[in-house]
Amino acid sequence: MTTTSAPIFPANTPIPIDLFVSKKHPGLPRGVIEFTDYSENIVYRVNRQFPKSSSNGKAVLLDSAGNPLFSLYPHHDGSWQGFKGDEGDKDLIFKVQRIVTKLTRTELEVFLVAENQGQGELTCDFKVIGCHFQRSCTIYKGDSIVAQDGEGDDSRDESV
């Protein structure tokens, strides 16, 4: 007979929270996405800034007080680069490369710059696999699931 037990987590493991994504919230300006907790308190906000006449734009992740945490810029090779704060020319933190784009599935590889320093070629630190139609996404580190998002039966736009 096989017995299973609940996984044991270290004492300093953060408590997971549900975040809800909204880009259709009343009063939300065009190009802004909000992440709220269950009590509808804003946890994060993403401001997308893409001029109509240019493909050079950026997305900035802000905390609940409006402070920039990091900014994302499209790179000429089709990837995205994430920089600390709102400065796009220093403090590169990560790079994201789309590796699969199908009608039913998208896969991204995330490379953390600090984890790959001095190794020459970047190695993938996280993999993101998502399905737009199911409004679902799973983030992996190796073979382990780090985070998962799926369509819930809540009345909000999407649950993360």
Image (cartoon, helix red, strand yellow):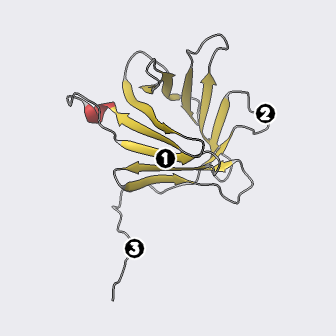
Residue at 73% in and 28% down: 29
| Image x and y of residue 76, in percent | 45, 17
Say whether residue 47 is left or right of residue 156: left
Question: Sequence order check: which comes first, mark 3 or mark 1?
Answer: 3
**Where does the image place residue 55, in percent across and percent down from the top left?**
58, 15
Q: Which residue is mark 2?
A: 27
Of the residues tagged 2 and 3, which is closer to the observer?
3
**Dot 2: element:** loop
Asked if the residue under mark 2 is in contact with the one under mark 1, i.e. CB atoms within 8 Å, the reply is no
Q: Residues within 10 Å of mark 2 (few under 14, many from 20)?
A: few
Please tell me whether mark 1 sits on a helix, a strand or a loop. Answer: strand
Q: Write the residue at 75% across / 54% down.
A: 155
Residue 127: percent from the left, percent from the top?
Answer: 41, 44
* Residue topped by disc 1: 129
The quadrant of the image that shows the N terminus is bottom left
Q: CA distance from mark 2 to mark 3?
A: 43 Å
Label 3 crowd bin: few (<14), some (14–19), many (20+), radius 10 Å: few
Instruction: Tell me if mark 1 has few (under 14), some (14-19) or many (20+) residues whose alpha carbon lies within 10 angstroms of its own.
Output: some
Marks 1 and 2, how far apart at CA: 31 Å
Disc 3 marks which residue?
A: 6
> Going from the N terminus, do you reach mark 2 or mark 3 first?
3
* Residue depicted at x 65% and y 35%: 33
- First-in-chain label (1 vs 2): 2
Mark nearest the camera among 1 and 2 is: 1
Name above or below for residue 79 compared with residue 115. Answer: above
Given residues 69 and 33, the one toward you in this image is: 33
Judge whether 62 appears above or below 127 on screen. Answer: above
Instruction: Answer with left or right where residue 22 lies relative to residue 96.
Output: right
